[in-house]
Image (cartoon, rainbow, N blue to C red):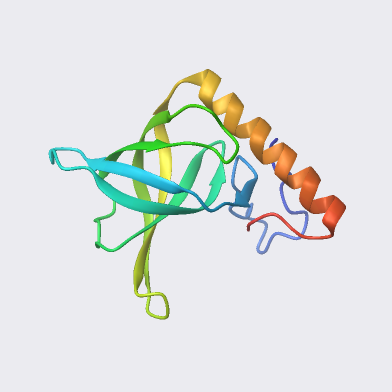
Amino acid sequence: MNEQPDANSKNGEAPYRRRYVRVAVDFPVSYVREGVEEPKAGHSSDLGGGGVRVSTDEDLPLGAVLLLRFQLPGGDREMVARGRIVLSFYNAEEQLFFHGIAFTQIDPREQEEIIRYVASEVQRLALEGETAAD
């Protein structure tokens, strides 16, 4: 499920586009920062085949590597993926840090399962007249 390039790019440059479609999600995520033994709890806010956005109560640095554990909504088993933080920001209203995490190591079968889940959510949202996450 690749997004197509925007025909209305500025200055002849191709705009940034995600490789995978993302959808809004809401499920717990456990993570361990590389070099730190203690698992911490976070919460997902969007998911795609290439990564996940996780909210935490701690400020994690860009480039930090995390081992993630989560279960898809309606899923029956835990998924494990390694990812690198590529985006971080603080949401003052929610008093949480949000981290965009790009998967760097994930079982291809689990990645396919995520892609199928996202595709089914996109279809469900289209039928309900909603949109996928930007």
Instruction: From the viewer's side, name the closer residue of 96 and 104.
Output: 96
Up-down relation of residue 90 to residue 73 (above or below): below
Question: Image point 80% across, 44% down: which residue?
Answer: 123
Against 45, residue 22 (above or below) is above
Q: Is residue 81 left or right of residue 17?
A: left
Quarter of the image with the C terminus in it: bottom right
Residue at x 65%, y 63% (from the top left corner): 11
Residue 57 position within the rendered picture, expressed as x and y whole percent measured from the top left: 28, 63
| Res 131 quadrant in image | bottom right
Where residue 68 appears, x then y in whole percent? Answer: 35, 38
Quarter-wise, where is residue 81 in the image?
top left
Foreground: 131 or 57? Answer: 57
Between residue 39 and residue 105, name the one nearer to us.
39
Residue drawn at x 48%, y 36% is 71
Tell whether 131 sits left or right of 87: right
Q: Tell me which residue sits at (67%, 31%) in the image.
A: 116
Q: Position of residue 112 (x, y in %)?
A: 60, 25
Quarter of the N terminus within the rendering: top right
User: Is 78 or 129 nearer to us in this picture?
Assistant: 78
Looking at the image, residue 44 sits to the left or right of residue 119; the answer is: left
